[in-house]
Amino acid sequence: MSETEVRRRPGGRSARVRAAVLDATVELLRAHGLEGLKVGDVAERAGVHETSIYRRWRNRENLLIDALLAASEVLRVPDTGRVRDDLIAYATDLAAFLATPTGHALEHTLAIAGDDPVMRQARDRYWAYRSERSQQMITRAVARGELPDTVDPRLVIEMLVSPVHFRVLLTREEIEDGMPARVVDALLAGISPVR
Amino acid sequence: MSETEVRRRPGGRSARVRAAVLDATVELLRAHGLEGLKVGDVAERAGVHETSIYRRWRNRENLLIDALLAASEVLRVPDTGRVRDDLIAYATDLAAFLATPTGHALEHTLAIAGDDPVMRQARDRYWAYRSERSQQMITRAVARGELPDTVDPRLVIEMLVSPVHFRVLLTREEIEDGMPARVVDALLAGISPVR
Amino acid sequence: MSETEVRRRPGGRSARVRAAVLDATVELLRAHGLEGLKVGDVAERAGVHETSIYRRWRNRENLLIDALLAASEVLRVPDTGRVRDDLIAYATDLAAFLATPTGHALEHTLAIAGDDPVMRQARDRYWAYRSERSQQMITRAVARGELPDTVDPRLVIEMLVSPVHFRVLLTREEIEDGMPARVVDALLAGISPVR
Amino acid sequence: MSETEVRRRPGGRSARVRAAVLDATVELLRAHGLEGLKVGDVAERAGVHETSIYRRWRNRENLLIDALLAASEVLRVPDTGRVRDDLIAYATDLAAFLATPTGHALEHTLAIAGDDPVMRQARDRYWAYRSERSQQMITRAVARGELPDTVDPRLVIEMLVSPVHFRVLLTREEIEDGMPARVVDALLAGISPVR
DNA sequence: GATTAAACGAGACGGTACGTCGGGTCTTGAA
DNA sequence: TTCAAGACCCGACGTACCGTCTCGTTTAATC
């Protein structure tokens, strides 16, 4: 999904350069963080000339986005047969991913990213991809009869993942072990006792 | 709450300089956004020498944080007597604030901010302040008997505000009119019909 | 002799930039003196970006030295066939050169210059060049039989030129017309009447 | 001779401050060299407020000159009864002094110093003092009949001391042991064998 | 297998902003 | 009223990194 350009000659020099650069980018992100990522360093580590990077990605942001989206495919959507377990597992996985330097960097990049067409498109593509996949947990639960068909999958997913992002990105507080479960339970049962 | 230093001579030159600089910072943020804020411009607009800014705030980030926190005191906590109304009003207000350039800039700055002591302290102070005040909505509801005393005010507030921040900061999707109400309802009643 | 780098493409942009910057430097030195020479001004006058100057020369001093050494090639070594005339002519020329703003600035720069490797090398190269050439006046005289082969060319040249430098640099007294001749005569004949 | 101002209350606070500052200046010069001398450091070391220094000396240069001239009184004029010995001893002493950090700094300061009235006067006073005293070696020799009364004392002294200054200030070459003697001999006897 | 166009290597340069440094002035509280 | 303390003004220096430009060289697809 992070393919920005048409690959004319797969496996040729171009492809090698591209792969080396994206790898180096992620690697350096992990090591020095977002601010510490310099195009020149990426070039050096990739064994490629800086000019070649600018030629292909035009600027630092494009490179970043391309590299990070490629690195974000690790998130898997569980399918245990029970919503509660699915949601807890997903939130836990997400928290773990966001705790890695790569995950952290991805978040920051998305948060910082401007609104030029390129970034906008990249961002939209990323969230569309994630929404679509994670909402399957809800639609499957509805199909199984676990949840009423009146639920709004998007809202549910948002209320599930946003507290995790919130802590990672804004308050920077740790996500303690039971947190995902408590979020899921509050979400499923509500906080008022009776109606 | 954004007071970083002891005011030795309140009203003296130092205080005047400080105020002028913070005002200019917020003003320019509103005008040119986060990326467009240059320390040199702030200095010029504040009628102060650039060096004086660096002397006091050390770098751009510290200046930003100080200015933004000062500008974030507008958020009020409602007290209507009914949780649902309180929470909806608060979330709506928050969404409105985050839609302003100042609010946007505040979010971004907090998200970008590094982990040096200065920023960490500023961030912690900010969230402590906001948490403490907003959780009053929950504790009041518990006192009134509207909510059971088993609810975790912190979790509730997080689940209330994080979807708003999430959209503003990450997906950049609009917050439609009914959204706060739907979040509150899901939170209060839960999404599973029966247990 | 002030060539610090290998010219890869002689006459290319690099060479043009280099020449323009050195010219501008000497020109501004002439105009505003040593203290008044700002790197930014040089850049502007040379039609070159300030960064380019810092990239190549690293700091103001290196630029100065390079420019001044380039400007000091005007000193010619006379060859009249008679030592006395040669020495007087040389000392007179030297005095004239040192009286120009450029000469003045050269002196000051050499006197001020620190002992970092770059400056040290520049200084050594300069004096080696000047020594070697000026001592030819003595060796030629010895070859002609005008002077005994026991004379130390280096000492003689030092005793010839140092009074000139001394006045220009330290006492700042004028070098009156007959001064070089009197120095040369004292040097050749000695000041004691008999031996 | 380095008294720039009238001492109103010798021994009073003013005098103490003045002495402490000048001492600190020379001390720091010795330690960090000319470039490394900061007014703020001097103030701190002297246990005096920076403002007090600026009040009295007005700027860094004046302070420097005042301190250095005070430190240059160590040069003594020998009187052995024989010109050759006198001159050699004097030149040797001079070389030794100029080799000390203080001597070095004095030279540099004089060489760098601008032409504003203050510096001009300080410089003139310094050289007048040194000239007057050192030329006594020549006039005494003339009185003794050792030298003809046609010699120009000023020229002789210049030709004696300038090679020393030359090496210290410009070429930065070491002054080897026999050098003063060879200069003196060349000066007394001349370098041409016979006329 | 020779040709040719795209991509790459190399390196200087333009440009913008950041942050530093240090000399020197000015305000203010306190003695 | 004077003085110590310290913030401030001012103007430079030097740094860092982004992104551009030019030219020579390699590579890989095409003839």
Image: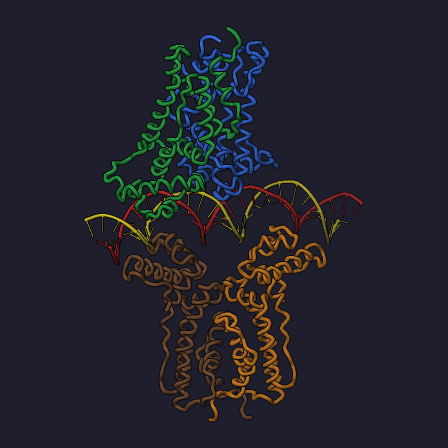
Chain colours: A orange, B brown, C blue, D green, E red, F yellow
Q: Is residue E15 above or below residue B191?
A: above
Question: Compared with residue A172, is residue D135 higher up or lower down, i.e. above or below?
Answer: above
Left or right: residue C176 versus residue A13 is left
- The answer to whether residue C39 of the structure is visible from this angle is no
Image location of residue D65, percent across then percent down: 36, 35
User: Residue at point 63% right, 63% down?
Assistant: A3
Q: Residue at x 31, y 40 (%)?
A: D57
| Residue nearest the viewer, comparing D100 with A138 | D100
Q: Quadrant of the N terminus of chain C?
A: top right
**Residue D111 appears in the rendering:** yes
Residue D137 % position (x, y): 39, 19
Task: Determine which quarter of the picture holds residue B93.
Answer: bottom left
- Total marks in image: 0
Q: Which is more toward the observer, B89 or D178? A: D178
Nearer to me, B160 or C79: C79
Please report the residue visible at 38 percent of the width from the left and 10 percent of the height from the top. Answer: D149
